[in-house]
Image (cartoon, grey):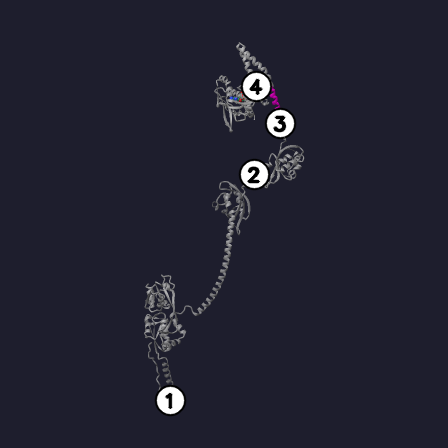
């Protein structure tokens, strides 16, 4: 502290006049002046005789204290001290230094007051501090290019620009941050920041703001955080209460308004006037209320929304579940479902629909439903579709094309969908009625068949009421349909045999049995007629008998015809018997004289010498022989037909027998220059046969073969063969003769029938040989067959079951069985 002699002003004393009054006045004035001087002197003494004061301060702490362009100190503190000086009358020597220097000058006792000083415990040991007069933040700033700096710990590793002697240094060090770069003053830090020397710095907010704006760096550096908040004090040497009091008393004389005025001057007038601030506060208050209201409304709304959301979630869940359910119903429905839009383009189909038409959903979706309609039904379909647009619900049958080219008949039920009045499309439910249609058609045909049946058909319930009668029933009975339907069968057949046997038949039918037979009925006009009837029970699905079906045929005519036929047959049989008897008698009667003719003609031909007479006798013998053969055959046939043929079968070696018979035809064959060959395939082929009959067969077949063959050969073969798992003995007579037309194959086995008949026939014969051969073969359980080609030849074959030793020892019995 520097104490300087105070500079006092004195007033010259006037010399008083001699006159008393003047003397008195002069005395009063003198005393007054004396008193005044005394007061001043006392006053000067009472103030510790401080007439000037030296203050040191940081000269680089804008806007509190800093130097102008000219180097003069300026700022809030400068102005405040000027005012202090004016108020106290004590001269103020305010000196600005680098803070460090100012601080050390103060320590060295070369100043009375240290300005712009922050309080700390260390300083408190050496200084007395006035009350704080300004609150100051000490923030950390960082360059835009950096990030992540948010507290003191995040500063590790960064070089931090600080002012030498600044209180922040000890704060950093206490927190372990030692990478500090000290500068003489704040401006130097800002300049270092401007040229990139440091990117992080710590400067009290007021000078920081001042210099950042001054050097146009406010856009490049960001406020990171406030390291601490300090307060500006004024400090005097510890215990220097005189100065402390002078300083504090002096500032007590300065009103806060005056201080505000000074600060305003240096810090600028706030943009917003107090009035405006008040309005702003009101506005803010109202806005706050509104915001609060809005917040409350918001909270309420949020709760409502949450409740609604929960409800929606539940509803959505239910909707999803129900949609899932409907989708499942849609997919598993037994009906085909097809959804189409307003242009009838398919938008969705279910599985059943796919199965019905054979197309996959991918093939169907996007195509027009019309593509599935048969071309001949398109016009009608178009009409129905137009009706649907007007909301008309329709059910119709439609034939649809299937993928495999076939078609199905579907019963379609459509529902139109609307959004207001706008037609959206249709939902079509399809039932495949193809089978039903076929059944209906079959039923229709069946019904028509029954209805138009040539037989009478009646369906009668178990109470004997006629449920159904077809047209023929009406025609045959003469009753009208309603007369038949509305009456019981008993009434209608009261007069008939059927009625007579009614109870019995009905009982049979009720037992589930069928009855068939002939019944005599009466028409409405009383005319009797015969019917062939079949009565069958009709059962329901449970197997219970509910009805009977009666199928009848008017057989009056047929019956008459059969009666006639039976009569004719009886007559024919009688005639046949007579014929056989006649033939037998005639044969006998003719044979007796014929024996004489043959005998005598034979004698004559051997005794007559005359050649001509001898030839005549031979002709008589030949004609007689032929007549005898014919008679024998007629006789044989008669015997067979009248069952008078004596039949005596026993095992015969048919090979040897055939060879013997064939041999007798050697000369006949050689006469016609034919080769006759007999082939026996096995040593002994035995069959149970009647000797006479088998010889008869062989004679007929070999005789015919030679007779109907002009050139070539006749081959007779005997062997065995397996036919239908049975061993047969066969005799085959094969020729190279004229052959037989296929159409006549059956005919030649009939009696008296020949291929060539009438007067123009080429060959002699009776047409009885094969008839007898067939009958004889049949009698011996054999079969005769022929294969023939006209111009090539014929093969006749007879087969008989082979006799086997292990068979019954009584062959005759076996053969006749
Ligand atoms: P027929 O006395 O006329 O020979 P058949 O009953 O023996 O009488 O024969 C009937 C007919 O069958 C013959 O008239 C003949 O037309 C025909 N027929 C029989 N055997 C032969 C054969 N081997 N070749 C051609 N035709 C034959």
Which residues fall within the magenta stretch?
558-584
Label 4 belongs to which residue? 632
Label 3 belongs to which residue? 566
Label 2 belongs to which residue? 442
Dot label at residue 731? none
Can residue 648 be seen here? The reply is yes
- For mark 3, give the secondary structure: helix
Residue drawn at x 51%, y 53% is 319
* Alpha carbons under labels 3 and 1: distance apart: 209 Å
- For mark 1, give the secondary structure: helix
Magenta span contains residue 572: yes
Dot label at residue 23? 1
Mark 2 and mark 1 lie on one chain; the one further toward the N terminus is 1
In the rendered image, the vertical position of residue 706 relative to residue 482, given as above or below: above
Judge by depth and name the residue closer to the eye, 466 or 419. Answer: 466
Q: Position of residue 97 (x, y in %)?
A: 32, 71
Find out whether the residues at labels 3 and 4 contact each other: C-beta distance under 8 Å. Answer: no
Can residue 338 be seen here? The reply is no
């Amino acid at each position: 502290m520097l104490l300087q002699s105070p500079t006092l002003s004195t007033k010259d004393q006037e010399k008083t006049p001699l006159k008393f009054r003047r003397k008195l006045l002069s005395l009063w004035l003198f005393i007054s002046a004396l008193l005044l001087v005394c007061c001043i002197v006392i006053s000067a003494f009472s103030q510790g005789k401080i007439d000037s004061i030296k203050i040191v301060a940081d000269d680089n702490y804008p806007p509190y204290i800093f130097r102008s362009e000219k180097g003069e100190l300026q700022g809030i503190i400068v102005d405040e001290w000027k005012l202090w000086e004016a108020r106290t009358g004590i001269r103020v020597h305010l000196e600005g230094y680098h803070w460090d220097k100012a601080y050390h000058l103060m320590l060295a006792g070369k100043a009375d007051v240290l300005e712009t000083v922050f309080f700390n415990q260390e300083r408190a040991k050496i200084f007395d501090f006035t009350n704080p007069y300004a609150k100051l933040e000490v923030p950390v700033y960082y360059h835009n290019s950096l990030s992540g700096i948010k507290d003191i710990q995040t500063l590790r590793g960064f070089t931090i620009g600080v002012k030498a002697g600044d209180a922040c240094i000890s704060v950093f060090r206490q927190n372990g941050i030692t990478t500090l770069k000290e500068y003489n003053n704040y401006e130097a830090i800002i300049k270092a920041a401007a040229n990139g020397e440091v990117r992080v710095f710590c400067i009290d907010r007021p000078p920081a703001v001042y210099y950042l704006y001054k050097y146009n760096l406010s856009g490049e550096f960001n406020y990171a955080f406030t390291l601490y908040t300090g307060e500006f004090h004024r400090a005097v040497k510890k215990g220097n209460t005189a100065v402390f009091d002078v300083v504090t008393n002096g500032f007590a004389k300065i009103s806060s308004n005056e201080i505000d005025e000074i600060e305003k001057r240096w810090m600028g007038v706030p943009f917003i006037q107090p009035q405006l601030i008040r309005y702003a506060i009101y506005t803010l208050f109202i806005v706050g209320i509104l915001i609060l209201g809005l917040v409350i409304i918001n909270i309420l709304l949020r709760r409502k929304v949450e409740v609604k959301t929960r409800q929606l979630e539940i509803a959505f869940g239910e909707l999803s579940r129900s949609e899932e359910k409907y989708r499942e119903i849609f997919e598993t429905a037994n009906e085909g479902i097809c959804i189409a839009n307003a242009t009838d383009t398919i938008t969705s189909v279910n599985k059943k629909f796919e199965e019905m038409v054979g197309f996959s959903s991918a093939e169907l979706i996007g195509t027009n439903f019309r593509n599935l309609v048969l071309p001949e039904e398109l016009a009608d379909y178009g009409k129905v579709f137009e009706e649907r647009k007007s909301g008309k619900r329709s059910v119709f049958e439609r034939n649809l094309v299937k993928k495999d080219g076939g078609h199905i008949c579907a019963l379609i039920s459509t529902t139109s969908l609307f959004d207001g009045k706008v037609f959206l499309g249709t939902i079509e439910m399809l039932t495949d009625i193809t089978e039903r249609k076929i059944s209906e058609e079959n039923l229709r045909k069946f019904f028509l068949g029954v209805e138009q049946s040539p037989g009478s058909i009646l369906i009668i319930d178990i109470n004997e009421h006629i449920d159904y009668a077809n047209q023929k029933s009406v025609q045959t009975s003469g009753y009208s349909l309603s007369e038949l339907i509305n009456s019981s069968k008993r009434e209608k057949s009261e007069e008939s045999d059927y009625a007579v046997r009614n109870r019995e038949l009905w009982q049979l039918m009720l037992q589930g049995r069928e009855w068939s037979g002939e019944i005599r009925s009466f028409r409405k006009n009383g005319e009797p007629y015969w019917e062939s009837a079949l009565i069958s029970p009709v059962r329901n699905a449970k197997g219970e008998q509910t009805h009977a079906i009666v199928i009848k045929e008017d057989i009056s005519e047929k019956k008459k015809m059969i009666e006639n036929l039976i009569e004719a047959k009886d007559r024919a049989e009688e005639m046949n018997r007579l014929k056989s008897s006649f033939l037998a008698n005639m044969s006998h009667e003719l044979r007796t004289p014929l024996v004489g003719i043959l005998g005598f003609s034979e004698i004559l031909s051997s005794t007559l010498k005359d050649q001509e007479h001898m030839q005549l006798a031979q002709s008589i013998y030949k004609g007689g022989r032929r007549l005898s053969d014919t008679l024998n055959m007629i006789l044989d046939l008669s015997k067979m037909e009248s069952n008078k043929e004596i039949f005596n079968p026993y095992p015969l070696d048919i090979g040897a027998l055939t060879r013997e018979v064939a041999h007798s035809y050697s000369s006949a064959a050689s006469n016609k220059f034919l080769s006759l060959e007999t082939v026996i395939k096995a040593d002994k082929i035995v069959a149970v046969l009647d000797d006479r009959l088998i010889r008869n067969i062989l004679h007929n077949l070999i005789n015919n073969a030679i007779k109907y063959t002009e050139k070539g050969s006749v081959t007779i073969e005997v062997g065995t063969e397996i036919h239908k798992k049975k061993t047969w003995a066969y005799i085959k007579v094969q020729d190279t003769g004229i052959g037989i037309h296929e159409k006549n194959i059956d005919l030649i086995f009939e009696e008296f029938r020949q291929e060539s008949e009438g007067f123009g026939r080429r060959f002699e014969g009776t047409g009885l040989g094969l008839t007898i051969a067939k009958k004889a073969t049949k009698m011996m359980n054999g079969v005769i067959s022929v294969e023939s080609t006209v111009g090539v030849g014929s093969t006749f074959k007879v087969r008989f079951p082979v006799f086997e030793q292990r068979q019954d020892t009584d062959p005759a019995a076996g053969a006749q069985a």
